[in-house]
Amino acid sequence: GDLFRRVYRIFAHAFFHHQQLFDNYESTHLLCTRFIMFFRKYQLVPNALFKREIQIPAASLYFNRQQRKQKLTQYFARRKQIEQQQKAELESAKRHASISSQDEFMKNSAIAELESDEVY
C-alpha cells in the first residue's frame, strides 16, 4: 500500500500542478490509468485505500475500455510512424556515409593513381 500511495501522489501532484502536461501525457500513454488498473486488478491495495487516495477525477483518466483502446491504437500508430521515420533517417545517413567513405577510398587507392593524368 505504501508504494502505491507514494507513486500515486506523484501522479496527483502532476495532475493538480501541471494539469495540461498531465492531460497531454495521459492521453497518449495512459500511464496513470494503467497504474491504477494494475493495482485494482491484482488487488495489491485495499479498496478503502483507493477511496481515500484517489483524487484525480475519472474524467481525466481512461477507465472506459473503448476510450483506452482508441488511445492505445493512436499511441501505437504514432509510435510506428516515428520508428519508420527514424529508420528512413538512419538509412539516409548510412547512404551518405558510404558515399563519403567511397570517395575517400578512391582518393587514396592505387586505382586513383592509375586514373591520374600522368603518362608512364
Image (cartoon, rainbow, N blue to C red):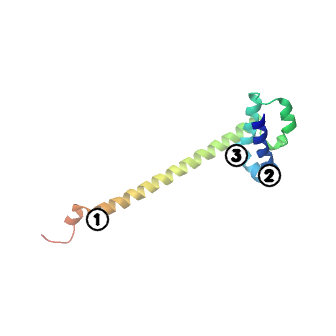
Where residue 28 is drawn, which disc sits there?
3
Q: Which callout, 2 or 1, points at the residue further toward the start of the chain?
A: 2
| Crowd class of label 2 (few under 14; some 14 to 19; many from 20; radius 10 Å) | some
Q: Is residue 88 above or below residue 64?
A: below
| Quadrant of image for the C terminus | bottom left
Task: Report the mark closest to the observer, 2 or 3.
Answer: 2
Q: Secondary structure at mark 2?
A: helix
Residue 95 in sight here: yes
Where residue 19 is drawn, which disc sits there?
2
Q: Which amino acid type is marked by label 3?
A: Thr
Q: Is residue 114 above or below residue 12?
A: below
* Residue 67 position in % (x across, y down): 75, 39
Q: Which amino acid type is marked by label 1?
A: Lys
* Residue 4 position in % (x across, y down): 76, 37
Where residue 69 is drawn, which disc sits there?
none
* Residue 6 position in % (x across, y down): 77, 41
Residue indicated by mark 1: 107
Q: Is residue 96 above or below residue 1?
A: below
Q: Describe residue 21's horizontal placement relative to residue 54 as left or right.
A: left
The answer to which of 101 and 35 lies nearer the viewer is: 35
Could you tell me how far apart the alpha carbons at marks 2 and 3 are, in whole angstroms?
Answer: 14 Å
| Crowd class of label 1 (few under 14; some 14 to 19; many from 20; radius 10 Å) | few
Q: Which callout, 2 or 3, points at the residue further toward the start of the chain?
A: 2
| Quadrant of image for the N terminus | top right
* Residue 39 position in % (x across, y down): 75, 32
Could you tell me how far apart the alpha carbons at marks 2 and 1 are, in whole angstroms?
Answer: 59 Å
Residue in the picture at 17% in, 72% down:
118
Question: Which image quarter: residue 114?
Answer: bottom left
